[in-house]
Amino acid sequence: MTTLVTGATGQLGRLVIDSLLARGAEPQSIVAGARDVPKAADLADRGIRVVALDYNDPATIAAAVEGVDAVLLVSGSEVGRRAAQHQAVIDAAKAAGVAKFVYTSAPKATTSDLVLAPEHKATEEAIAAAGLPAVILRNNWYTENYAADVARAAETGTVAASVGAGRVASANRADFAEAAAVVLLEDGHIGQVYELGGDVAWAYDDLAVALTEVTGRPVEYVALSSEEHGAALEAAGLDAGTAGFVTALDAGIRGGALADTDGTLARLIGRPTTPLVDGLRAIA
């Protein structure tokens, strides 16, 4: 079986390829789709076929999917443009008759109030409308998303947010990548929608404790209102639109958008997910 991994030079895509190889996939069975092909030279050196694939260029997508059996669509990073970009991959996969289409979505994408959810909802609906034999991986937050908080906590001894008592079932990016490799290589997953999260849904007080252990200095969680948070972000140099986006994300967390965990990720990968403090320590 030949598997195309889109976004192969990105952080998640590279880890998926690592996991495919670790789970026994032959290098020649993997196709790495990259917008910037030279950045994937190390993958080519490992015997992996590298092809040009730009979400904004349907011709490259059509060429990349030709002859492959399975496609992993790693969601794009250009917020506001992703639904159209993903549609181009869906259309190409349908035309090529791929046997398995895997998509990295967001938690509860079709019902969530999370500001990032609408584009994922649109993509899931497009996959269904196309009739693709699909597996939906609704990935919770990556612990690596907190890299800036690790650095800030080491400097200031605080982690500030407007999430209230909201909880986050994060896991390391490698955990989610391994789950993608599992469903790509194994039979029996088509038609499934997997809500994937870490084994523990932690609150920001727990984050402060973990940051204390990682940084070696006392770290306090400073709970802000959305208004206070937005003002602080703008004072730090963010424009109003970006500050509003961040506070909207925090509002979603405060409302429970990332709090659910039922052990599905651990069951798929056959081991516990990476604990928060270990994930943060790897970042540090």
Image: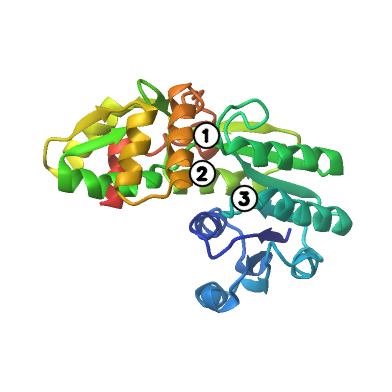
Crowd class of label 3 (few under 14; some 14 to 19; many from 20; radius 10 Å) = many
Give the answer, above or below, for where 255 lies relative to 101.
above
Crowd class of label 2 (few under 14; some 14 to 19; many from 20; radius 10 Å) = many
Q: Which residue is mark 3?
A: 75
Report the front residue among 33 and 166: 166
The residue type indicated by label 1 comes to: Leu
Residue 283 percent across, percent down from the top left: 30, 51
| Residue 213 in view | yes
Q: Earlier in the sequence, mark 3 or mark 2?
A: 3
Q: Residue at x 16, y 48 (%)?
A: 155
Q: Which residue is mark 1?
A: 265
Q: Residue at x 65, y 73 (%)?
A: 49
The residue type indicated by label 2 comes to: Phe
The residue type indicated by label 3 comes to: Ser
Depth-wise, is mark 3 or mark 2 nearer the camera? 3
Q: Earlier in the sequence, mark 1 or mark 2?
A: 2
Q: Which residue is mark 2?
A: 176
Q: How many marks?
A: 3
Report the front residue among 87 and 139: 87
Report the front residue among 242 and 190: 242
Depth-wise, is mark 3 or mark 1 nearer the camera? 3
Residue 52 percent across, percent down from the top left: 67, 73
Circle 3: element type? loop
Residue 268 percent across, percent down from the top left: 55, 36
| Residue 46 in view | no
Marks 3/2: CA–CA distance: 13 Å
Choose top left, top right, bottom left or bottom right for residue 160. Answer: top left
Residues at badges 1 and 2 in contact (C-beta under 8 Å)?
yes
Residue 209 percent across, percent down from the top left: 21, 31
